[in-house]
C-alpha cells in the first residue's frame, strides 16, 4: 500500500438539520480550504485497571470508556464573490453556526449586493451543529454533531479563522481522496489600505487584530447520549494602537469605560468584512513597541446592552 501524503487532505462542513444526523457535506458545495496541516485526534479515556490486586505488579485489563474526535482547522478568510454568482453565506458558515451564531442574509446579487450578518445567540432553538468530513490520503473521518470554538486573527497579513472542532467518535472509513477545485472567492488581508479600525469613533493605526467570540464548548456524556454543546461565551477584541502621551487609556481601564470598536477589512474585489462591537470595556493595557514607537497592547471584553448584541460580523459582496 502506498504512503499517505501529508498534503493530500480535504475538509468539508455543512450545517445539520438535526444534531448528529449526517448532513453529507460535499466538495463541490461545502469545501473549506485549511491553511496548514489538518489532523484528527481521537481523545480516549480508559479504565486501565491500575487498582486491581492480582498477586503481581502492573495493571489489570483495560476497558475503553469513551472516545471522541477533535481537529483544529485554520483557514484564510474569503469573501462571498461578485454579482448574482456570489455566495449567500461564506465558506466558514458552518464554523460560525457551530460556535453559537445565527445569520441574517440579504441582497439578490443583482440590484443589491449579497450580505450575511452573524450575531451571537443564546437561544437553544437557534444553536445548531454541523457535519464535517476530514479526508486524509485514503481515510475519511466523519465528525457529526460538531460544536467548535472560533477566532479571527491578523497581523499585517492575511486574516485567518481558527476553529477547534469536537464531535463524538465514529470509526474512520477507507475512501479515496476527492478531487478539489480551489475556490475563486477573494481573500481578506490586513494591510495599510485594506483594513480600517476605529476605537470610540476615532481611527487608530494598529499592527495586529484579534477577535475571539470566546466560545466555551462542553461535553455532555450521559446514558444514551454523548455530544458536545456550546455552553458559554466571553467575547474579546485585542488591538495594539500607537500610544499617545495621555492617561486616557489608564483612566478608561480604571473606570471600566466602554467604547465602540469597528474593524473593516476590504479585499481586492472591494468586498467588506466588518467586525462591529458597540460596548467594549478594557480589561488589559500594557506597553509594546513597533518600529521604535511605543504601542498600547489593549484587550477588551465585549458586553451586552439588551442581550446577545455584543457584536456583529458582516460579509458584504459587490455587484
Image (cartoon, helix red, strand yellow):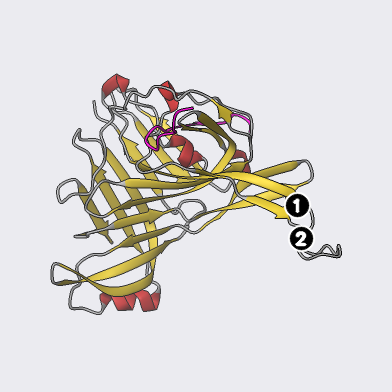
Q: Could you say which is closer to the camera, residue 72 or residue 113?
A: 72
Q: Position of residue 158 (x, y in %)?
A: 26, 46
How many residues crowd around disc 1 within 10 Å: few (fewer than 14), some, or many (20 or more)?
Answer: few
The residue range painted magenta reads 1-18
How many residues crowd around disc 2 within 10 Å: few (fewer than 14), some, or many (20 or more)?
Answer: some
Q: Is 40 left, or right, of 312 in this rendering?
A: right
Q: Is 218 left, or right, of 153 in this rendering?
A: right
Q: Which residue is mark 2?
A: 59
* SS of the residue under disc 1: loop
Q: Could you say which is closer to the camera, residue 196 or residue 91?
A: 91
Q: Which residue is mark 1?
A: 62
Quadrant location of residue 178?
Answer: top left
Q: Is 223 left, or right, of 219 in this rendering?
A: right
**Contact? badges 1 and 2 (CB < 8 Å):** yes
* SS of the residue under disc 2: loop
Q: Could you say which is closer to the camera, residue 69 or residue 280?
A: 69
Amino acid at each position: 500500500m502506498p504512503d499517505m501524503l501529508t498534503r493530500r487532505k480535504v475538509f468539508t462542513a455543512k450545517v445539520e438539520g438535526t444534531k448528529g444526523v449526517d448532513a453529507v457535506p460535499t466538495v463541490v458545495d461545502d469545501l473549506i480550504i485549511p491553511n496548514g496541516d489538518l489532523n484528527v485526534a481521537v481523545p480516549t479515556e480508559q479504565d486501565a485497571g491500575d487498582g486491581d490486586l492480582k498477586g503481581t505488579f502492573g495493571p489489570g485489563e483495560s476497558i475503553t470508556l469513551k472516545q471522541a474526535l477533535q481537529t483544529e482547522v485554520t483557514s484564510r478568510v474569503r469573501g462571498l464573490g461578485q454579482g448574482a454568482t456570489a455566495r449567500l453565506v461564506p465558506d466558514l458558515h458552518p464554523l460560525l453556526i457551530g460556535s453559537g451564531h445565527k445569520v441574517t442574509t440579504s441582497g439578490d446579487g443583482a440590484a443589491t449586493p449579497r450580505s450575511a450578518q452573524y450575531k451571537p445567540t443564546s437561544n437553544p432553538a437557534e444553536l445548531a451543529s454541523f457535519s464535517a468530513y476530514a479526508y486524509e490520503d485514503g481515510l475519511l473521518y466523519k465528525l457529526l454533531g460538531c460544536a467548535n470554538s472560533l477566532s479571527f486573527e491578523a497581523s499585517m497579513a492575511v486574516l485567518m479563522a481558527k476553529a477547534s472542532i469536537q464531535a463524538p467518535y465514529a470509526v474512520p472509513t477507507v475512501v479515496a481522496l476527492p478531487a478539489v477545485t480551489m475556490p475563486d472567492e477573494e481573500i481578506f488581508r490586513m494591510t495599510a489600505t485594506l483594513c480600517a479600525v476605529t476605537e470610540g469613533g476615532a481611527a487608530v493605526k494598529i499592527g495586529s487584530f484579534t477577535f475571539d467570540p470566546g466560545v466555551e464548548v462542553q461535553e455532555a456524556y450521559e446514558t444514551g447520549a454523548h455530544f458536545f454543546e456550546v455552553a458559554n461565551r466571553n467575547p474579546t477584541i485585542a488591538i495594539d494602537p500607537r500610544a499617545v502621551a495621555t492617561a486616557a487609556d489608564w483612566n478608561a481601564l480604571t473606570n471600566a469605560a466602554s467604547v465602540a470598536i469597528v474593524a473593516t477589512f476590504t479585499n481586492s474585489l472591494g468586498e467588506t468584512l466588518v467586525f462591529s462591537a458597540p460596548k467594549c470595556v478594557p480589561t488589559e493595557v500594557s506597553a509594546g513597541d513597533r518600529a521604535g514607537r511605543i504601542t498600547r497592547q489593549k484587550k477588551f471584553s465585549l458586553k451586552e446592552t439588551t442581550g446577545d448584541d455584543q457584536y456583529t460580523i458582516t460579509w458584504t459582496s459587490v455587484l
